[in-house]
């Protein structure tokens, strides 16, 4: 079997060495602690890895473990590529050595020092802040933006003898040497410019060195060459070789003996190894399949001679297979099997070991609530099943400030967990909530702001930063929490979670306090569209944010015509018209627009909404002709009213958002001034419902002078 496995390993792509940047192991070790990898894994478990894999292969596995081990427990922690690579480098630190063969590209060093002039600094004896390997000479490998120096070196293979021109372009200074001869001196504390030098070279290997310094401001660097048969171009990595420290994987073993491989293949087929392991080999597939194993329930006593106590095991298994498990037992077994209780506490038990807790990082000043994975006690009483399903499936997040990463589960498994939690933890009245009252929204907005309960001090609100630590976003809480828990939490947070940073907001839970929680609940029900409370910091730059009045922005909008008007509402429900075609074209909620694309640069930039729930609407049909814009006025609430017409028909087109139990909706009124308007409302798909007078509006409508067609958009 071992020989056969050796042969399968030899059939895989060859392992390769990759450069070992300075600090690679340290970054991975820190990430190991921050992500609480030690909750499930002991470092000694991976002592064998340096002898059997390489950094690219291990990185690929960490990025998509289910692709490599579909039949085994392998959680997807949604690592970024840089995180996966850092963890792979940490686990394979024992491989680091000088690469046996120079790597394609350039060795680099980055020095952090004060750059006081354009002159070449003395770098001898200085310890670089970073060193590594790159395939491009440039500033991307810098460790900071100002006051640093870069040094690149490589063995350069010159393809033909003759005169060669080398060029360096930089902001600020740069120098280029060939075989220790200074060829280019480009000294200046100035914007990017190029300098060139010529040198006659024989074909073959030559030593290249480039030094660059940056004082303050912009930074840029390029190195080019030109010579016999080679046009001016950046010096390519293919022509350079660098001697660097690298992760050096094990040398491939010699091919195994064919006869031993054949015996191992037969043994693997006889033992049904593919019942658990993926194996794509034509020779294996051609072997006859072994006899199917008998079902466990059909086994008799004494048929498992290799297992002590086989008869007792069989009897217990038979009872377990026919018994109806309580839902609480199913949930507990799943939590243990999936490793959830290695990180989370539930009912006062389990959770992270002390050694792992000590390595956790605090990103926000929220105490243990900002470091630890949340307690799962009463999770089904606290959280809506729909939210919990989306959370476990990786569609939403709640605690961005907790470094420990929640694994992503399959959609079916996530839904099953939500049902289990609701069944085990749910209580009567969990979802009882008062009917939506638009009048309560303003009261809730005032309570959340400065001068109210100051919720914005510790909570982000619809993506807007808090004044203090960046706690959980309030705009997600209505879809996240069950109403009964929301009320209890606001009124009794200290009792429900001792040590919480959530303050006591009311002296008692009397009628006034109860009414305040109802008002906050109605305000939060608007989600991303909730009107922002007093004190939320204004966005920076050219970001437009309607606060107290409607904001209009004429711009080139992506996918529409050059004549567009975006309309932002304080209700944080926005829309855009394509005026060239007389169409309501976009709907969205939350943040409005970043106008930098319109106001920066001569050509401008096509804009997209900043918020969420962006819907691109199909055009209304006007069978008679394309509408033409004949005028524009403003309603008393600041929303624009467009006057369109074609032929003898003329009408006003006005849209404005309003509060609704579903969050917000948009009301569009087509009021005919003269003639007759014929309009066809298309099917907007499942994401957007359009109604008129309480019924679906799809189809043709004829509107006479003096009449109005009111269309309500819900999404």
Image (cartoon, grey):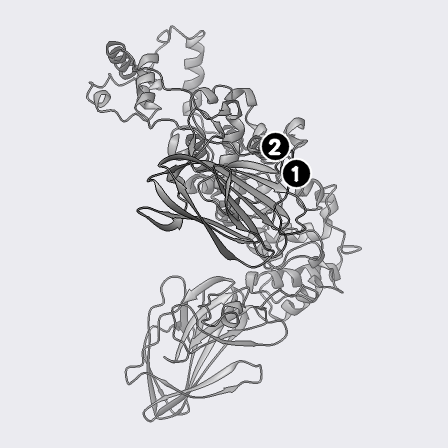
Circles 2, 1 touching at the beta carbon (< 8 Å): yes
Image position of 514 (left or right of 96): right
Q: Secondary structure at mark 1?
A: loop
x and y, in percent, of residue 367 in the image: 72, 42
Q: Secondary structure at mark 2?
A: helix
Within 10 Å of disc 1 (Cα), the crowding (few <14, some 14-19, many 20+) is many
Q: Which disc number belongs to residue 361?
A: 1
x and y, in percent, of residue 117 in the image: 65, 52
Q: How many numbered tags mark residues here?
A: 2
> Where's the N terminus, which quadrant?
top left
Image position of 384 (left or right of 74): right
Which residue, given by chain and number where applicable, does mark 2 sit on? Answer: 33
Cα–Cα span, label 2 and label 1: 8 Å
Residue 654 vertical position relative to residue 543 in the rendered view, above or below: below
- Front residue of 48/623: it is 48
Q: Could one spot residue 291 in this view of the protein?
A: yes
């Amino acid at each position: 079997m071992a020989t056969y496995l050796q042969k399968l390993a030899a059939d895989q792509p060859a392992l390769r060495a990759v450069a070992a940047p300075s600090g690679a192991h340290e970054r991975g070790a820190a990430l190991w602690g921050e992500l609480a990898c030690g909750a499930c894994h002991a470092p000694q478990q991976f002592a064998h890895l340096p002898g059997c894999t390489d950094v690219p292969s291990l990185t690929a596995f960490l990025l998509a473990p289910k692709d490599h081990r579909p039949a085994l427990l392998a959680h997807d922690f949604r690592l970024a590529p840089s995180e996966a690579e850092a963890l792979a480098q940490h686990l394979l630190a024992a491989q680091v050595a000088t690469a046996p063969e120079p790597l394609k590209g350039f060795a680099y060093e980055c020095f952090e020092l004060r750059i006081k002039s354009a002159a070449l600094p003395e770098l001898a004896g200085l310890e670089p802040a970073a060193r590594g390997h790159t395939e491009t000479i440039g500033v991307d490998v810098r460790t900071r933006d100002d006051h640093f120096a870069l040094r690149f070196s490589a063995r350069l293979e010159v393809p033909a003898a003759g005169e060669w021109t080398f060029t360096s372009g930089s902001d600020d200074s740069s120098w280029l040497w060939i075989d220790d001869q200074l060829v280019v001196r480009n000294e200046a504390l100035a914007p990017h410019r190029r300098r060139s030098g010529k040198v006659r070279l024989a074909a073959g290997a030559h030593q290249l060195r480039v030094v660059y310094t940056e004082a303050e401001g912009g930074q840029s660097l390029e190195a080019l060459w030109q010579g016999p048969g080679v046009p001016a171009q950046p010096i390519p990595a293919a022509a350079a070789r660098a001697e660097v420290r690298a992760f050096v994987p094990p040398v491939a073993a010699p091919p195994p003996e064919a006869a031993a491989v054949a015996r191992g293949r037969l043994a693997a087929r006889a033992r049904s190894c593919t019942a658990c392991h993926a194996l794509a080999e034509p020779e294996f597939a051609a072997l006859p399949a072994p006899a199917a194993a008998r079902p466990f329930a059909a086994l008799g006593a004494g048929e498992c001679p290799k297992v002590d106590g086989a008869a007792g095991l069989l009897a217990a298994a038979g009872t377990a297979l026919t018994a109806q498990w309580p839902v609480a037992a199913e949930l507990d077994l799943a939590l243990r099997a999936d490793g959830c209780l290695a990180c989370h506490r539930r009912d006062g038990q389990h959770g992270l070991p002390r050694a792992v807790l000590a390595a956790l990082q605090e990103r926000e000043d929220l105490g243990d609530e900002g470091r630890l994975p949340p307690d799962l006690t009463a999770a089904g009483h606290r959280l809506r099943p729909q939210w919990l399903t989306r959370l476990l499936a990786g569609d939403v997040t709640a605690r961005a400030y907790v470094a420990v990463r929640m694994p992503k589960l399959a959609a079916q498994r996530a839904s099953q967990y939500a049902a289990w939690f609701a069944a085990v933890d749910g209580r009567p009245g969990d979802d009882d909530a008062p009917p939506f009252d638009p009048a309560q929204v303003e009261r809730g907005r005032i309570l959340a702001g400065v001068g109210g309960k100051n919720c914005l001090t510790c909570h982000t609100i619809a993506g807007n930063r808090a004044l203090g630590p960046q706690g959980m976003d309030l705009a997600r809480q209505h879809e996240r929490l069950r109403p009964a828990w929301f009320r209890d939490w606001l009124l009794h947070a200290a009792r429900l979670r001792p040590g919480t940073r959530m303050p006591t907001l009311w002296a008692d839970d009397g009628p006034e306090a109860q009414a305040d929680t109802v008002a906050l609940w109605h305000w939060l029900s608007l989600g991303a569209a909730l009107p922002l409370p007093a004190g939320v910091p204004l966005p920076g730059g050219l970001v437009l944010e309607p606060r107290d009045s409607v904001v209009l922005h004429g711009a080139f909008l992506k996918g529409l015509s050059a004549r567009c008007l975006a309309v932002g509402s304080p209700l944080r429900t926005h829309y855009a018209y394509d005026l060239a075609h007389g169409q309501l074209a976009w709907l969205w909620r939350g943040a409005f627009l970043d106008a930098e694309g319109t106001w920066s640069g001569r050509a401008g930039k096509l804009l997209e909404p900043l918020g969420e729930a962006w819907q691109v609407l199909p055009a209304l049909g006007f069978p008679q002709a394309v509408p033409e814009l004949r005028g524009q006025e403003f309603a008393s609430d600041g929303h624009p009213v467009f006057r369109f017409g074609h032929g003898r028909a003329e009408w006003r087109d006005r849209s404005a958002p309003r509060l609704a139990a579903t969050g917000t909706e948009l009301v569009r009124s087509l009021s005919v001034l003269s003639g007759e308007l014929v309009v066809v409302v298309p099917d907007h798909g499942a994401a957007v419902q359009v109604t008129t007078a309480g019924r679906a509006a799809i189809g043709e409508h004829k509107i006479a002078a003096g009449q109005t067609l009111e269309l309500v958009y819900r999404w």
